[in-house]
Image (tube, grey):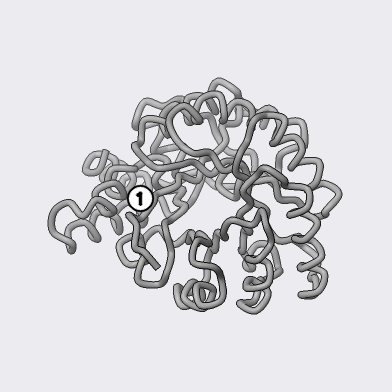
Amino acid sequence: MNQSPTEVITAVPTGFAAHGEVDAVASRAIFEHVARSGNEGAFVLGTTGEFPALSLEERGQLTKLSLEVLSPHMRVIVHVGAPSLFETLQLIEQAREAGAQEIAVITPYYLPVTDEALEDFFRAVDQASKGLQVYIYVYAKRANNFVTPQLMGTLSQLSNIAGAKVSEEPLSLLSEYREVVPEDFVLYTGADRDVISIADHGAQGVISGVSSVLPKPFRAAVAGEGDREQRQADVDLAVEAIAGDMGRMHYAFELLGVPSGTCRMAIAAPGTQTRAQIQDAVRRLS
């Protein structure tokens, strides 16, 4: 396939008030920070956005806000996954009405499902997604369900399925998927530490929560600026400091002067040693 520049898609956190309410002002501040990142796109209401803790109404409100703030600057992929097809179809329609053009759908989660049930689920998603580009979200360590290469090959033939986002799986799985999907099928990985090498495995980009607060090392990595070892070292520093942890992200935002609120889910605030590590990363990479 033709090699294109690696994309960085920001996995965006959600801002919550101290007692757990969605904080629209904080969420807007996060979106505005991401809009200035120079990244190619944003992935909203995914794992980093704490989607399992959000109501249907809250997801609709945040979808509208994200599109308002971000779409003038970058692509926006709205995650609409849920445990059931019933909920997912409602979220698809909600995203469409808000003006979304790209959506992601995690495999049904919590209860295990068969490959046959997964195929039926994504065929129904495809039929409901006319006019939208759909990315299958594979995250077996959180969703308890996995998309095999054989099944991905089948699903990739559906008319509205544009690609997949794969989290916490070896890069070799991307190569296996690439072997069975069409040439224009887009593969993203959540392995942001590997941003420099993912093209070797047939992927087009990373979806990175770390880049929500520290985009510069990722921009340098995909632009090929400077020494490769230094670029990798800077990415490693960012990833080790933030670690895909939303509590750490909110502390980093605080250091950057972004009033991002806090988490809703049971995510611990960083301790003294970790805060010092984040301070160093922000000082060196922002």
Relative to 65, is 215 above or below? below
Relative to 139, is 42 above or below? above
Q: Nearer the viewer, residue 210 or 32?
A: 32
Evaluate whether residue 19 shows in this view: no
Q: Secondary structure at mark 1?
A: helix
Give the left or right position of residue 32, taking residue 57 as reference: left
Amino acid of disc 1: Gln
| Residue at the top extreme, as displayed | 25
| Residue at the left extreme, as displayed | 227
Give the left or right position of residue 140, taking residue 87 as reference: left
Q: Nearer the viewer, residue 77 or 113?
A: 77
User: Which residue corresponds to the image point at 45% horizontal and 35% vertical from the top-left?
Assistant: 74
Q: Quadrant of the C terminus?
A: top left
Relative to 243, is 15 above or below? above
Q: How many marks?
A: 1
List x then y, in percent, for residue 95.
69, 36
User: Which residue corresponds to the image point at 72% horizontal and 45% vertical from the top-left?
Assistant: 130
User: Which residue corresponds to the image point at 62% horizontal and 58% vertical from the top-left?
Assistant: 137
Q: Quadrant of the N terminus?
A: bottom left
Residue position marked by numbered label 1 in the rendering = 273
